[in-house]
Amino acid sequence: MATVPAMRRSLARALLLGVPIGAVLLAAGAYLAVALTRRPPPLAFRAAQLPSKFPGGRLRMTWPAGGEAAVDVEGIGPLDPSGAQHPVPIASVAKIMTALVIVRDHPLSAGAQGAEIPITQTDVSTYRADRALGESVVRVTDGETLSERQALEALLLPSANNVATVLADWDAGSEAAFVAKMNARAQALGLTATRYADASGFDPGTVSTARDQARLAMLTLARPILAQIVAMPQARLPVAGLVHNLDALLGQDGIVGMKTGSTTAAGACFVFASRRLVGGRRVMVVGAVLGQPLTRDAPTVLDGAFAATTRLLRGLSHGLETLGLLAHRRPVGWITAPWGRRVAVRTAAPRAFVGWPGLPVEVRLRQVDHPRAPLHAGQEVGQLVIRAAEERLRLPLVVSSGLSTPSLEWRITHP
């Protein structure tokens, strides 16, 4: 349709040609009616440059010089592990699976004590035999009773091999039958490089990889009772009295527990869970270091595993990144009106999306192709979908300020 100047020229021409003024005014009125009632044209959206990977160079991890190690970041998945990742003896780290089978067969809430487990003369004989072999044990007496929770505390904190046998017999009737359950559970969880020969891990035939154990650690944290116990610095048992957690790193570098292990065949082993703060977001990092040198002259034979873990976590602290695209004040694009207004489009709230330098990321925008005015500040206009490794995030997108409909003059001049 014609513009206002063109309308004036058309009106003058119509009058000169003798067209009735009424007809001209009727046509002009129809033009104005259409111009004022016609829906404003769609707004245009232009996206900011979207990243294809996390910022920074290559992630540099301080992996142990020997043995093997693996790290898994909550929501993201595993980093490329260190070492050959061949099945190796894992010592008392095996007790993680022992505990998982027990709480699956005998569910226990975080605040409960659970069933009572009687200690027999056979259990006392096992305690004495294990102690004679130099295994880690806690003292038990004939007629004593341990609650399920107390037995798990004895298993996971001072790492009592004799209590692993007590739990196996109580659950399955024999250690052999219980070990069959452990192996079945490992296969069900996809731990294809893991094989259990006993419930305590003292047998060098109990083997796994750091990668399998890191995966198992993440699954263990999903059991509130087990997450609670491995985070305890100590516990009190009926006969053994006060027992201490062998995890000397508990409370350091964000470590919230897990399991130690050491034998001559396995070396020093440590499966750990650490809660890290990255870009304002708390993420759980789990990992395993296996086959580290035993340090007989150090305060603990596990010092080699502890030192390797500390180096891993501190290196990872400098390596984990957040995606700057999700900063609350950073636009992911702009909506522009044909009548000259422009507003920024942002995520509705700040959110940390965690990864490591160079990690590929897929970012897609949805539902922001053809918005229309008017828009009010904070109005949702689409969604931002981000995928990286195992994590997927969907966030609402909003306009940072309002955008009104076009003015009367613009409507008349741009029908």
Image (tube, rainbow, N blue to C red):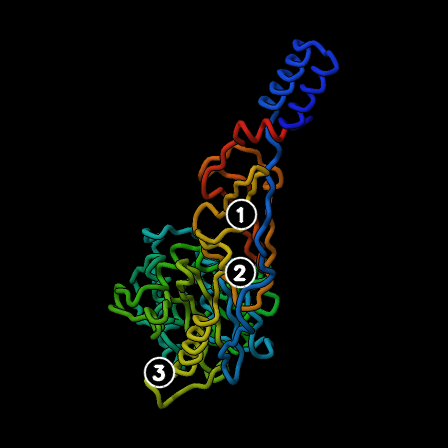
Q: Amino acid at mark 2?
A: Ile
- Residue carrying label 2: 76
Disc 2, SS: loop
Marks 3/2 in contact by CB < 8 Å: the verdict is no
Counting other residues with Cα less than 10 Å from the Cα at mark 3, is it few (<14), some (14-19), or many (20 or more)?
some
Q: Residues within 10 Å of mark 2 (few under 14, many from 20)?
A: many
List the single residue furthest toward the front: 16
Numbered circle sitting on residue 293: none
Quadrant of the frame with the N terminus:
top right
Between marks 2 and 1, how big is the CA–CA gap? 15 Å
Q: Residue at x 43, y 48 (%)?
A: 349
Q: Residue at left 40%, top 87%?
A: 295
Instruction: Name the side, left or right, on which 408 lies relative to 23.
Output: left
Q: Position of residue 237 (x, y in %)?
A: 27, 64
Residue visible at 55% across and 64% down? 54
In this image, 152 relative to 193: left or right? left
Element type at mark 1: strand
User: 78 and 223: which one is in front?
Assistant: 78
The image shows a total of numbered marks equal to 3
Q: Measure how far apart labels 3 and 2 are at the Cα level.
A: 33 Å
The disc, 2 or 1, on the residue closer to the chain's N-terminal end is 2
Quadrant where the image shows the C terminus: top right
The residue closer to the viewer here, 30 or 23, is 23
Residue marked by disc 3: 300
**Is 33 left or right of 106, judged from the image as shown?**
right
Dot 1 crowding, Cα within 10 Å, few <14, some 14–19, many 20+:
some
Report, in whole angstroms, how far the alpha carbon at label 3 lies from the one at label 1: 47 Å
- Identified by mark 1, the residue type is Arg
Q: Are marks 3 and 1 in contact (CB under 8 Å)?
A: no
Q: Nearer the viewer, residue 219 or 167?
A: 219
Residue behind mark 1: 394
